[in-house]
Image (tube, helix red, strand yellow):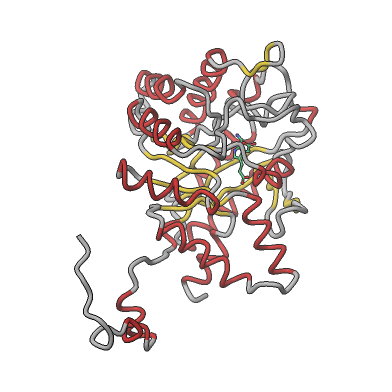
Amino acid sequence: MRPTQSPFPATRLRRTRATPAIRNLVRQNTLSVDDFIWPVFVRSGEGIEEPISSMPGVFRRSVDKVVEAAREAADLGIPAICLFPYTGLEERTEDCAGAWDPNNHANRAIRAIKAAVPEIAVMTDVALDTYNINGHDGFVEDGEIVNDRTVEALVKMTLAQADAGADIIGPSDMMDGRIGAMRAALEGAGHQRVMILSYAAKYASAFYGPFRDAVGASGALTGDKKTYQMDPGNADEAMRLIERDLAEGADMIMVKPGLPYLDICRRARDTFGAPTFAYQVSGEFAMIKAAGQNGWIDEERVMLESLMAFKRAGCDGILTYFAPAAARLLQGA
Ligand code: PBG
């Protein structure tokens, strides 16, 4: 495949690196605001923007403030926003009924954004962890995270989100069979145009730490998520999961976390060619922020370089808490 190159000095690879103009000309991958999905945390109340200490510059926002954030994102050209509910321990129950309540604050936020900022796509999170008394993504029976009963609940949650106006459903739970069940329910309810972006290859990762603070799950979670999220040692299993989710009707797939799993992104892109996303998760964000705040790295340059890495690995887009900051930089604002 690869043509042979003339030996030195006929080939001097530095020639195409000599000036900014030529570097711009030959650059293979580019980063643009079109590549971003911005994850945002929604909480109850009004007029609230509550800082999250392990995620500097990220807030838990009440619905009115989420709408303002969506307006700002749309004005920056960010194509999509992804909503994650924060729930206090007192709002969590064993039956997780809050998850499919049409008036939970995530669903109210979907309606409010669709009314005020119709041009931005709204993505959701489907998993029980933010409503569950024990912080797990599924129901727990006798210490076991049960699959099929959880899928039934996830379907109800999905339909409530679609009814509220969600454009992209984001199942992050890793139960078996949920994509097919969700797709069938959406079709049956007349939501043919609602997409599913499956968290297909989601690893049991320590990089989610700050997120669990952000959504109030750190105190709630008992045990770990290793019986449903993937083992970091596995790669072929990720391909089987992605293949399965696409066969069940996923429109787009995600690899998560991001930077530590770029090999999986590249394999997914090359193997399936489906719209491929990576989630630069809370721990990745926090590390860059912390080192930047200490003056140990140049935060802006590391941010852009880390985002470019996803494009080089074959991703179509990135879920990143840096979305607005990166958008501002890319637009020279
Ligand atoms: C849970 C969920 C998690 C994240 C997104 N959805 C955490 C987990 O699985 O425990 C992590 C996102 C991040 O770390 O930024 N359904």
Is 262 left, or right, of 135 in this rendering?
left
Residue 29 in which image quadrant: bottom left
Q: Quadrant of ligand 1?
A: top right
Q: Nearer the viewer, residue 72 or 240?
A: 240
Residue at position x 40%, y 60% in the image: 312
Is 23 left, or right, of 78 in this rendering?
left
Q: Nearer the viewer, residue 250 or 77?
A: 250
Q: Nearer the viewer, residue 232 or 155?
A: 232
In the rendering, at what x and y percent does residue 196 appear?
Answer: 41, 34
In the rendering, at what x and y percent does residue 303 appear?
Answer: 57, 65
Residue at position x 74%, y 38% in the image: 216
Relative height, residue 28 to residue 157 (above, below) = below
Q: Nearer the viewer, residue 9 or 200?
A: 9
Total marks drawn? 0
View extreme (front): residue: 7
Relative height, residue 246 to residue 175 (above, below) = below
In the rendering, at what x and y percent does residue 179 appear?
Answer: 43, 26
Is 240 left, or right, of 39 in this rendering?
left
The quadrant the N terminus occupies is: bottom left
Residue 294 in which image quadrant: bottom right
In the rendering, at what x and y percent does residue 81 appear?
Answer: 51, 48
Relative height, residue 77 to residue 235 (above, below) = below
Relative height, residue 303 to residue 126 (above, below) = below
